[in-house]
Image (cartoon, rainbow, N blue to C red):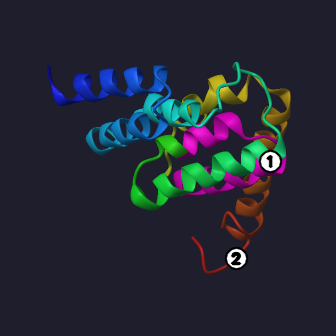
Amino acid sequence: MNATARHEALARIYEASGQKEKAIHHCEELLQLNSSNLNYYTQILRVHGFSKPAGSIYTDEEQAKIEEIMAEYQKNLPRATAHQRLLLKVLSGDRFKQRFLAYSKPLIVKGAPALLIDLKADIYSSSEKTKIVEEVLLSHLASMEATSTLSGSPSEE
């Protein structure tokens, strides 16, 4: 059995038996092996008690706790984007808007064409998120047309 399969099995077993710390430990070992796997972050949230069905909206307090949990992984794995995508999946309202702005801006600057394709399943299932994405992208377009920057700041090109 390879290391990935071993950690996945142990994480599932510990999660099922209610041994939260051990389950999270094995999920974190998996993140060291593959920090791009969205399922590992999802499992960490599930172990913490966040497992609403797709399309459900978390309360503001729950969203704040989820952001707090994911902030630790963002700090330890700054180059990974899976935790950012997970936040876009579970956050709503202003929290979603702020995260989408932070996530999309560098990708637009880089010219990453897969931005919306990568997120479409999570965005298009929510009319609120679709509207926010439209507002943000139209704002970026207006800023680019007016100042050739995304934020309107001349120091950014």
Q: Badge 2 is on which residue?
A: 153
Helix, strand or loop for disc 1: helix
Q: Which residue is mark 1?
A: 61
Query: Which residue appears at 44% of the width and 41% of the height?
Result: 21
Quarter of the figure with residue 22: top left
Start and end of the magenta stretch?
84-109
Which SS does the magenta portion mostly show? helix
| Residue type, label 2 | Ser
Question: Label 1 crowding class (10 Å Cα cut-off): few <14, some 14-19, many 20+?
Answer: few
Q: Is residue 100 visible?
A: no
Q: Is residue 105 magenta?
A: yes
**Quarter of the image where the C terminus is located:** bottom right
In percent of width and height, residue 7 lies at 28, 29
Q: Position of residue 87 (x, y in %)?
A: 63, 42
Q: Residues within 10 Å of mark 2 (few under 14, many from 20)?
A: few
Looking at the rendered structure, the secondary structure element under dot 2 is loop
